[in-house]
Image (cartoon, coloured by chain):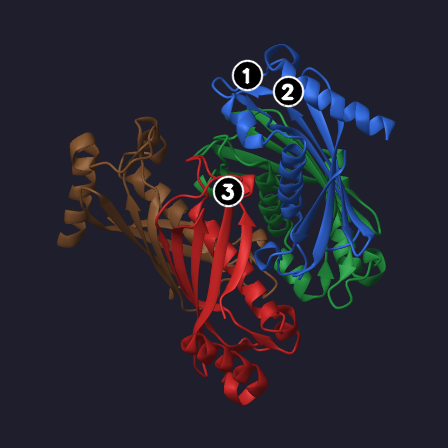
Chain colours: A red, B green, C blue, D brown
Amino acid sequence: MISITQIVVRYQETDQMGIVHHSVYPVWYEVARTDFCRKMGMSYSKMEEVGLMTPIYEVHSCFKAPAKYEDVLTVEAFLNKISEYRLEFFYRIFKDDILIHTGSTTHVFVGKEDFKLLNIKKRFPEIYDMLKNTVEKEKME
Amino acid sequence: MISITQIVVRYQETDQMGIVHHSVYPVWYEVARTDFCRKMGMSYSKMEEVGLMTPIYEVHSCFKAPAKYEDVLTVEAFLNKISEYRLEFFYRIFKDDILIHTGSTTHVFVGKEDFKLLNIKKRFPEIYDMLKNTVEKEKME
Amino acid sequence: MISITQIVVRYQETDQMGIVHHSVYPVWYEVARTDFCRKMGMSYSKMEEVGLMTPIYEVHSCFKAPAKYEDVLTVEAFLNKISEYRLEFFYRIFKDDILIHTGSTTHVFVGKEDFKLLNIKKRFPEIYDMLKNTVEKEKME
Amino acid sequence: MISITQIVVRYQETDQMGIVHHSVYPVWYEVARTDFCRKMGMSYSKMEEVGLMTPIYEVHSCFKAPAKYEDVLTVEAFLNKISEYRLEFFYRIFKDDILIHTGSTTHVFVGKEDFKLLNIKKRFPEIYDMLKNTVEKEKME
């Protein structure tokens, strides 16, 4: 499954170079991830409610062309990998069908109360299966 | 007591107009409030730990002149009023001794667990007394 | 004309209190203003291109109830007043038909090159007329 | 040269997980870069004034431990590489002498007016030499 989210660039997201500040892209990744989870039938808010958090371990961003105020962008997100301890998402951002940005985020699983690393397969097997199936379906597509 | 905080404008805080985006000023108020509490001998982190939160009820900002990237600014914060249910801070921002901005924030008191309004005088009398004394000393100065 | 914009709360917009940080609301006002201008037939990007900028002079925000991650909000924006030197917008934010926030922004008109105050009626009469008509129509509604 | 910058975590920089949001770290890199340039004797504001801009081409971030509100952090920045077309900075962030984060940014050189890639050695030879010397001195240290 590739989740597709439309973003309209906000004025506040620009900087004095006249383009979107680079720190905004991880925020857009997150908007796309929220949509991804919702489309998969499991809101991220609910994951946090049951006690599962997925803080970021690694972010990588590559900027091919700038985005500007009022640009209408398409953000693609898909789950690239899942293991018992980690999750990896890939992102592609398009402006008028031109790829302007690629990115990835790696997440770990931690418990809400103690913020300690956990094995998602053991602690939240249903969520693990749902995510695992999504990755496998993507590979077959 | 007037707390004085120095701020150096960050690149990310600018927008495509070439000036600091207006949504940044409440963030600076907050930095100044953090310093105010620390100088008063009570860190805001500790207030939250004991279960007291002070979400914003009202913000007012007045922009007299713009701030720019790398500007060194002085932010003054002082407690203007406190009642059993509310707290009001005033702010003044200077650039090279010229007043470029004034602001105020009104906060309510809520409990950390239920997020319901509380009477600070009853629930946290020591914190109330400390804040009350600060306001009174300011008036005598 | 009342412009209506839908906002879905982003994770990054929350703070450790578990609610949307107050500095985000002026960003939402701006998203609503962008929509307002577009619906009026004049994109804000184009206004800047012809040399007209409308920096903020004053912001006022009143928080009645918090917004949370993934909340779907409705932001209403309308032009309340226009004179030769200033512009005032009003905002109302709803969550499930409940009013959770009101705000206003006052803007001045400045030239792009010199950033000096200008009389919009003299320098950009067509834009002034368009804005003036919008305010008058609103009053008749 | 390793530039060292002290950062105190702002409340607004936290998210509902109770830790600093990952999108904030590139903003801190930028604060550290600003300091780096100033210590090298060349403010970034002045580089932009003479017509040189250094937008981001790539960002990489690795999160080893979270940062929290009011934490006092040390951000180290140093220039790792420079060629005629690119610049690479490395960052390390410490909390109480424990390394909690590493990052890097790769920048390209573009002209202010046309935003086109330029050869810094040809167009701004003095700036190139200054940066080149800094990298070489670092290697000898």
Foreground disc of the pair 2, 1: 2
Mark 2 closeness class: few <14, some 14–19, many ≥20 residues within 10 Å: some
**Residue A80's quadrant in the figure?**
bottom left
Residue on which disc 1 sits: C116
- Residue type at numbered disc 2: Ile
Which secondary structure, mark 3?
A: loop
Residue on which disc 2 sits: C127
Quarter the C terminus of chain D occupies: bottom left
Disc number placed over residue A71 in the picture, else none: 3
- Residue type at numbered disc 3: Asp
Asked whether the residues under marks 2 and 3 belong to the same chain, the reply is no
Which secondary structure, mark 2?
A: helix
Query: Residue D104, position in %: x, y?
Result: 32, 56
Asked whether the residues under marks 1 and 3 belong to the same chain, the reply is no
For the residues labelled 2 and 1, say whether their Cβ atoms are less than 8 Å apart. Answer: no
The image shows residue C16, relative to residue A1, as above or below, that is above
Return the residue nearer the eye: B64 or B36: B64
Left or right: C27 as drawn, with respect to D24: right
Query: Residue A29, position in %: x, y?
Result: 49, 59
